[in-house]
Amino acid sequence: MKYLLLLHAPDGPVTDTSSPAYAEAVAAYGKANAAMAAAGVLLDCAPLRPPASSTTVRVRDGRTIVTDGPAAEIKEQVGGYTLLECDDLDEALRWAATIPAAATGWVEVRPVMPVSPAS
């Protein structure tokens, strides 16, 4: 079963790439990702650029509306994701607890609904 882990941080990600905090975060995430990869459960992971860099698309009455910025103006935003293939939810939760965001913010674990590709 695939699980999408959405990484949340109340203050957003560390963006100053020259800071010691950034180097520590990269090392901590690297360690967690390496362990998941070694266990064969890691399918993909990446940090996301800040919410201000997003573009939102809505279609209303057949008209496409494109706006700069996130879909919702809230303080907490998704800062990254991890996609795992695990035997069950308990295994996904154990891995989620190893991700640094769980210690400073939270990790939302959501099962991916399997669908057949469109014919």
Image (cartoon, rainbow, N blue to C red):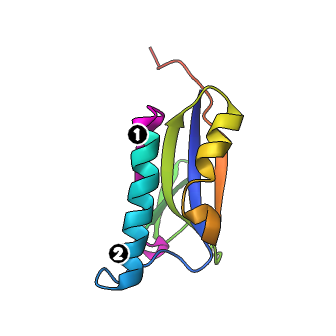
- The numbered mark at residue 84 is none
- Residue 54 lies in the magenta stretch: no
What is the residue that sits farthest to the left in this orientation?
18
Q: Which residues are magenta?
A: 38-52
Q: Amino acid at mark 2?
A: Ala
User: Residue 50: x, y in percent?
Assistant: 44, 73
- Residue 49 lies in the magenta stretch: yes
**Tag 1's secondary structure?**
helix
What is the residue that sits farthest to the right in this orientation?
90
- The numbered mark at residue 37 is 1
**Among the 4 quarters of the image, the one containing residue 75:** bottom right
Residue position for label 2: 23
Q: Amino acid at mark 1?
A: Ala
**Among the 4 quarters of the image, the one containing residue 7:** bottom right
Is residue 7 at least partly visible in the picture?
yes
User: Residue 88: x, y in percent?
Assistant: 67, 29
Is residue 105 at least partly visible in the picture?
no
Classify residue 115 as left or right of residue 44: right
**Residue drawn at (59%, 24%) of the image:** 114
